[in-house]
Amino acid sequence: MKKDRIILEKIERLKNEVKYLKDSKIRFLNNIRTSTDIKKIVERSVYLCCEMVLDISDLLIVKSGYSKPLTYSEIIYKLGENKIIPKKFAYKFVYIAGLRNFLSHDYMII
């Protein structure tokens, strides 16, 4: 099914991005306060991870036959409410939506 393939591709891309962040962690931490380039790289990479998690989550909800959520937070809550992920985890993980929004809209503050 097309949705399954898209979900798997997004998961693979997310895994690669997380690996990149992990592999570069020391370099990033050592230079993020002094290098605008590193700051921009980290910001973009973290934003991409947030965006991919939310895209995957949205696809899982729709694939499962539930109504499409209207907000990013609702996506995560619906995963928990419908037992796609543990509800307790969903209520902690919902902050990923806020992080995504912060990175997307509050770029003047960073």
Image: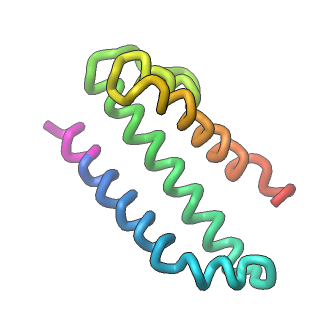
Looking at the image, the residue that sits furthest to the front is 88
Indicate the position of residue 67 as horizontal and vertical percent values: 39, 14
- Most foreground residue, 54 or 26: 26
**Residue plotted at (62% across, 38% down):** 95
Indicate the position of residue 15 as horizontal and vertical percent values: 36, 61
Quadrant hosting residue 84: top left
Indicate the position of residue 102 as horizontal and vertical percent values: 72, 46
Q: In which quarter of the image is the N terminus?
A: top left
The magenta stretch spans residue 2: yes
- Most foreground residue, 43 or 33: 33
Q: Is residue 10 left or right of residue 2?
A: right
Q: In which quarter of the image is the C terminus?
A: bottom right
Up-down: is 12 above or below 63? below
**Residue plotted at (34% across, 33% down):** 59
The magenta stretch spans residue 31: no
Indicate the position of residue 105 as horizontal and vertical percent values: 74, 47
State the extent of the magenta-drawn residues as a range: 1-7
- Most foreground residue, 93 or 45: 93
Quadrant hosting residue 83: top left
